[in-house]
Image (cartoon, rainbow, N blue to C red):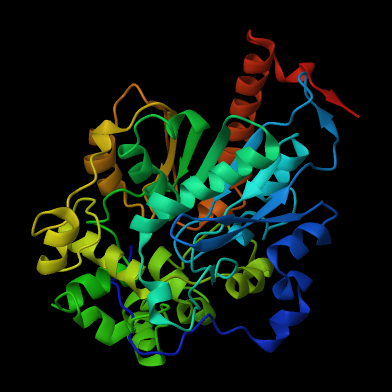
Amino acid sequence: MWSACAVGLVAVLCLGHVPDTWAKLDPEVHMTTTEIIQHWGYPAMIYDATTTDGYILELHRIPFGKTNVTWPNGKRPVIFMQHGLLCASSDWVVNLPDESAAFLAADAGFDVWLGNMRGNTYSKKHKDLKPSHSDFWRWSWDEMSQYDLEAMIDKVLQVTGQESVYYMGHSQGTLTMFTHLSKDDGSFAKKIKKFFALAPVASVKNIKGFLSFFAHYFSLEFDSWFDIFGSGEFLPNSWVMNLAAKEICGGLKVEADLCDNVLFLIAGPESNQWNETRLPVYTTHDPAGTSTQNIVHWIQMVRHGDCPAYDWGTKENKKKYGQSNPPDYDYTKIGGTEIYLYWSDTDWLADPVDIENFLLTRLQSSVVVQNNHLPDYNHLDFTWGLRAPKDIYNPIIEICTEDYLAQTAKSPTSRAERTRQ
């Protein structure tokens, strides 16, 4: 069913070719995340969270929705949504309000926060470094997990006065949470009421698409990947894109423009549940940027087969890790929070074999509350799919609502006990 993978290499980013006619369809094509939120009549706020290594991350907030829901203790529960690889906060608002996770949660009475990892459209700031300098881009999801999550969650708790949040992560937003929790001493886990993992990623040994293609097509050593992709922001050039598109999209019945977009070559260009009229909005907001080092780390994961820390090469590994090879993250050590998994057998990046043979064999059964296997979802359907509200978002909102009411009332209670005005 799926074709082989492919993609090219050079230095000019192809953010996705968008026909001129598309620009006339939806004004959100030209908007930022907060402008999209306001466009639909919701309040939008912007906050900065600074990591301990100096990166300044932009957070977007929808403090309340249109329904004016009140809660018994007068404080809205907080839900934090974290985007995936090459994506941004916009992922949670690019569909119509009754189809987008962030708007649905806001209308259900939640205080909604949207994260942005270092290096994407909204988080290209640092206390000392400029994005034009290669040192700005010397990080991968290791650092996102170690620094970014803590900084963003702590900022949310500081502003809201809450002690913990409900966390909904997609793709890389699950990988970073899994790895952070695997190293946690319990102090961070207590800040996460529940962890909802959409298209969860741990091992990527069996994935399809761009990353798999490059991992297997080129037998390159550590430094050679930077000769191909560059040492700063990940900006694949046209010949790389053409190579990948030919291999990955060959035989697939998809829009040609989707095969010009590196995100779709990584995550999969086929879906039977996207709002086709919104494709221009999707492709102008994503891909939203990352570092070449991060992409190299993903390629290393494909080759390694498990979930290793970044491989700096033998000499640097010995300095950093005290051993020649990077250590693996130990997911058997994850505890202290409840995890809900949502995955599919048609996902290119969160491959079902990797989930069943790696993730589910390592997570303790005591922390996995739900294991939801959804039919016919591609990797991006978990944020853009039209079935996602019914299959994923509304059930999550219901779970969080019941949990929060039970906590505030100190006994189980029903969703109906809230007041809508």
Q: Is residue 9 above or below residue 105?
A: below
- Asked which quadrant contains residue 343, the reply is top left
Q: Please indicate whether residue 16 sits to the left or right of residue 295 in the image.
A: right
At x 36% / y 48%, what residue is drawn? 345
Q: Quadrant of the C terminus?
A: top right
Specify the quadrant of the image occupied by residue 251.
Answer: bottom left
Q: Is residue 193 visible?
A: no
What percent of the width, then of the height, locates residue 203?
Answer: 26, 51
Q: Nearer the viewer, residue 238 or 345?
A: 238
Q: Is residue 241 visible?
A: yes
Q: Residue at x 20, y 82 (%)?
A: 224
Residue at the far top: name it.
Answer: 411
* Residue in front for this viewpoint, 33 or 208: 33
- Using residue 368 as the reference point, say whether residue 24 is left or right of it: right
Q: Position of residue 288 (x, y in %)?
A: 53, 70
Which residue is situated farthest in the front direction here? 128
Q: Residue at x 47, y 82 (%)?
A: 260
Q: Quadrant of the N terminus?
A: bottom left
| Relative to 128, 308 lies left or right | left
Q: Return the x and y of residue 61 as percentages of the image width and height.
A: 70, 50
What residue is shown at x 15% (from left), y 61% (from top)? Answer: 319
Q: Position of residue 265 (x, y in %)?
A: 40, 72
